Amino acid sequence: MHSNYGHDGGPPPKRPGTGAALFRNLVVVAVVAAVAVFVSGFLRGDPGITALLPHLAPTVNGTPKDPGPDASPGQGQQKAARAPDTPPPGLEEAGHPLGSPAKPAQASNSYKFLATNADGTPVGYSPCRPVHYVVNAALAPAGSEGLIADAIAKIAAASGLTFVDDGATKENAAEKRKPYQPALYGDRWAPLLISWTTPEAAPALTGSVIGTGGSTMYSFGTGPKSYVSGSMALDAPQITQLLRNAGGAHYVSAVIQHELGHVVGLDHVDDPIQLMYPEIGAPDGLAAGDLNGLYKLHTALCRPDL
Ligand SMILES: [Zn+2]
């Protein structure tokens, strides 16, 4: 259990300082082959109100893949082929982005992407298909009802991404979650897993870390990368405590939005006004930098080939 919030019902304490532990250890795994497929993932762990952890090891959501038998470039044709351990390509993919988010009222470049492609476009989910999600709510704290849906609505509005609630799951948070689990979710990319869990079950939540979020990206060889599945873990005991405080729901909502920010592709920034600052101490919701970053994610590549 965690009880050292330093939170007495007043406003959350300010951060101890900037530049502490930003989790810079981006994980990129490449396979050397003619047309290789690789999967790698990002997972960001975020402390609650207390001080930052000095370091959190990155987590790889997947392993390098060998090129599939159909992925040989020998025919001089780069036709989208189904690689091993992947669903049929292009499921639910429309010919155009599904949403068209409104441009943020205030310009700001105070945002950062977890990854970008060679052409500078952010690595994101294909905006041409919905992002499905499931929730493991077995440990959901009292008073948390609606917080996830509300946070998703805000991220959806800012990014133009369409989210689809696939309901409850019994899947538990895992350090190396497979992005393709046909036995559990059918022949498609596994939906984003949102789980209320504990530090015992999800060690990345140990100590003051209150949530983690990230997605697995996929590419064919050195081609453009896109996210195909993700996971978000919320520290149920810690959040249960927070929700007992006045204004706790507001803070928890900020935590969930921050983690969703990671899931869709935003990295931490050094600007404490932004929700993507690594320590969520002043939960005023999405700020101008966050909103501009999310808006830019609607330019992420559509992926009929994935
Ligand atoms: Zn974070």
Image (cartoon, helix red, strand yellow):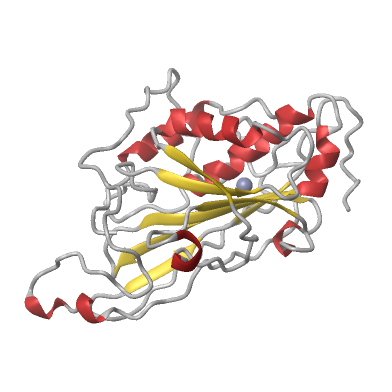
Q: Nearer the viewer, residue 27 or 304?
A: 304
Left or right placement of residue 170 versus residue 17 in this view: left
Residue 138 picture location, percent across and down: 72, 50
Q: Does residue 172 show up?
A: yes
Vertical side of 31 occupied by 255: above or below: above
- Relative to 57, residue 255 above or below: above
- The structure residue drawn at horizontal position 58% and vertical position 66%, both measured from the top left corner, is 59
Q: Nearer the viewer, residue 133 or 124?
A: 133
Q: Within the image, what quadrant is residue 147 found in?
A: top right
Indicate the quadrant containing the C terminus: top left, top right, bottom left or bottom right.
bottom left
Residue furthest to the top in view is: 105
- Residue ID at (82%, 41%): 240
Q: Residue at x 89, y 39 (%)?
A: 6
Q: How many marks?
A: 0
Residue 240 located left or right of residue 101: right
Residue 265 visible in the snapshot: no
> Residue 79, image x and y in percent?
14, 66
* Quadrant hosting residue 38: bottom left
Q: Establish if 234 lies above or below 291.
A: below
Left or right: 197, with 190 as reference point = right
Q: Nearer the viewer, residue 64 or 138?
A: 138
Q: Residue at x 71, y 62 (%)?
A: 202
213 left or right, relative to 289: right
Q: List x then y, in percent, for residue 295.
A: 40, 32
Q: Residue 156: x, y in percent?
A: 46, 33
> Where, by quadrant of the figure, is residue 159 drawn?
top left
